[in-house]
Image (cartoon, rainbow, N blue to C red):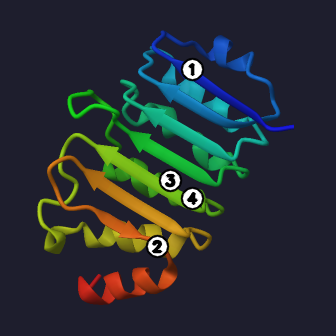
Amino acid sequence: EQIILTISNCSITANGIKTIPPTTNSLTIQCCRSCQWQKISKTVAALHQLKELVVLSCACCDELFSALPECTSLRTLRVGTVFPHAEKCNLSEETLLLLTKLRHLRSFTQVTEHPILDNPKTIKPMLVKSIIRNMPSLAGLRLYGFNSPNLELSNSREAIQTIQEYQI
């Protein structure tokens, strides 16, 4: 049985997240707010059948992602904004590096209101290199910025070409 759950437009708590069925496969948290994001992160990481997590337009900064490396079942992670003016939904470079510990992740997408890449030649090479090298199962990496160039790697051949092209 596949359980897909969406929580949107509300204030959420760790206790509220604990009521999510432990067999949930896909969780979307959209336009939500909380003062317990770190506790929520631990609760989400304990969902041992969670394969997909989508976090859109939530004022969670990095806190929601602190415990995610403990979620070994997670295969798809999408983080970002629905609207160009949503606030505090970007991940810091430190959190992106922490997420490289999600070694079984197959797809990672970050959509942000701020340009990630002002110019393709200014890709943060060590960050991309770390993501590619430390996430061996990653089949898709997408970094999008509104009004900016995007980075899409859909397979390891593209990753190798990107590493060579940008001298990562």
Cα separation, mark 3 vs mark 2, equals 12 Å
Indicate the quadrant where residue 61 lies: top left
Circle nearer the N terminus (3, 2): 3
In the rendered image, residue 157, in percent from the top left (x then y), is placed at 46, 86
- Secondary element under disc 4, as helix, strand or loop, is loop
What residue is pinned by disc 4?
Answer: 101
Q: Residues within 10 Å of mark 3 (few under 14, many from 20)?
A: many
Q: Is residue 20 left or right of residue 136?
A: right
In the rendered image, residue 89, in percent from the top left (x then y), is placed at 34, 34
Cα separation, mark 4 vs mark 3, equals 5 Å
At label 3, the amino acid type is Leu
What residue is pinned by disc 2?
Answer: 132
Farthest residue in the right direction?
Answer: 1
Q: Quadrant of the C terminus?
A: bottom left
What residue is pinned by disc 1?
Answer: 7
Q: Nearer the viewer, residue 164 or 45?
A: 164
CB-based contact (under 8 Å), mark 4 and mark 3? yes
What residue is pinned by disc 3?
Answer: 99
Q: Can residue 107 be seen?
A: yes
Nearer to us of marks 3 and 1 is: 1
From the viewer's perspective, is residue 153 above or below residue 50?
Answer: below
Circle nearer the N terminus (1, 2): 1
Q: Is residue 121 left or right of residue 30?
A: left
Cα separation, mark 3 vs mark 1, equals 22 Å
From the viewer's perspective, is residue 160 above or below residue 140?
Answer: below
CB-based contact (under 8 Å), mark 1 and mark 4? no
At 34% across and 33% down in the image, what residue appears? Answer: 82
